[in-house]
Amino acid sequence: MLLVFLRRFMMVLFIMSLLPMPAQTAVREIQWFAGPWGPSHAAWQSGLAESLAAFEKENNVKVHVIFHPNAIDRYEKFVVAAAAGTPPDVISITELGFMPQQGLLSDLTGYVQRSQLVGFKDYPAELWPRTMMDNIVYSVPAEAIPNLSLFYHKGLFAESGLPYIPEDKVLNWDEIWQITPKLNRFDADGRLIRLGIEPMSATGGSIHACVLSFGVPFLDASGKPMVNTPEWKAIVDNIVQPYWQYGASAVRAVHGWSNRLHEAQVAMQINGPWVAKELATLGFTGEIGNSWMPQQQGSKVQNLTSWMLAIPQGVKDMELSWQFVEWFCGGEGAKARARAEATPFVGPSSRPDPQLIRLNPSIQWFVRSISEANVMLAVDANPLWAEAQAQWRNIVLNPVIDKTKLAIQALEDFQQHLLNYLDK
């Protein structure tokens, strides 16, 4: 009996050895071309790591995050990879540019329509046109931020006998220029050593937001650019008056991002949606106050913008790429970035998590700006603006800063360039 059992057992083992072994599930991979906005910050990356690991484990996925230091570098590497038939699975972008016409991006319209995390209802309506071309969605907002706000050095205000600006106060530009001379400082030789305000410190592109804060539109009723107008000319001259008044070299000597504010070389500046507590996470000390961006009419107007995730054409697993985009923009990835407390509010804005609002001061600022703003500007939503942004610094700002060309002539050149672009 034992011999019969052993024979049968050996026969079963022999038959099983002939059967194909179940294949182990291979780890899937996602390559993400990230940066420069958002995931370029070290604190931001560390805050994302834990949640990213959870995503990888739950979905048997390895995410290879490749950070590029600038948008041009990322775009060039992306185009080369796409031409070779090996595009990344996800790419961060700030503008669609010409990528849809070049066939580089996937149509995400159906995915967005079906999504419960990053659907049309989950973001301010002003953001979606920025992600679309010819009514086709090519990207998903990863971060929606109100831009810009006014920052000021409280110590310099106290030293100059000026009251602090309340957080909810909206100064108009006339008030700004009344305050500024009281904050300027010069050395014994008359050289400027402290600038009262740097209106364009949030890179050159912020001048368009400054101009719009005077209530002057960028486009006419037909969608044509109308920057070559007496109103725009007067406002540009107004905004760049520190350069005219003190000279480009003098302003450059105290010009810079928030470190100059921190070092008391600039008393006020206009920048992004940073809040005072957030600046402290970057090592700043002292008292930095912030309030709404100046508006000539005194209204709470914000320029809503975002950076986005897109899926290239020809990715190896479209469903997996979308799963990552949806998780990153509206799922646990968004919460992880908020917990990092190193960047402005990220993710859908119409249903903010109350716990995250308490956790991150930037989210508080964002929610207030959405609920309190009288008007939401969305100049970035116009496809023309992608081209305008690319030309703005070269045609308008450099002539102004270098004082080699009048701002009026620069505006004329700028408008003609945009009209030529439309004619094409």
Image (spheres, rainbow, N blue to C red):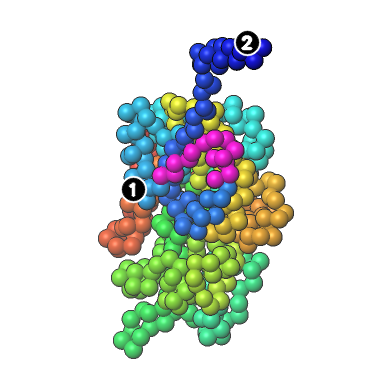
Q: Amino acid at mark 1?
A: Asp
371 to the left or right of 304:
right
Q: Which residues are magenta?
A: 53-66
On the image, the x and y values in percent for residue 36 come to: 42, 50
Residue labelled with disc 2 = 4
On the image, the x and y values in percent for residue 153 come to: 52, 75
Q: Earlier in the sequence, mark 2 or mark 1?
A: 2
Query: Which residue is painted at 60% across and 56% down in the image?
Result: 339
Q: Amino acid at mark 2?
A: Val
Query: Which residue is painted at 47% across and 34% down in the image?
Result: 29
Q: What number is the disc on residue 112?
A: none
Q: Quadrant location of the N terminus?
A: top right
On the image, the x and y values in percent for residue 255 come to: 38, 69
Q: What number is the disc on residue 413?
A: 1
Residue 318 appears in view: no
Query: Disc 2 to disc 1, how far (Cα)?
Result: 97 Å
Q: Quadrant location of the C terminus?
A: top left
The answer to if 393 sits in the magenta stretch is no
The answer to if 58 sits in the magenta stretch is yes
Residue 331 appears in view: yes
Measured along the vertical axis of the image, is residue 71 above or below residue 343? above
Quarter-of-image position of residue 402:
bottom left
Query: Which residue is painted at 64% across and 35% down in the image?
Result: 119
Disc 1 element: helix
Q: Nearer the viewer, residue 335 or 367?
A: 335
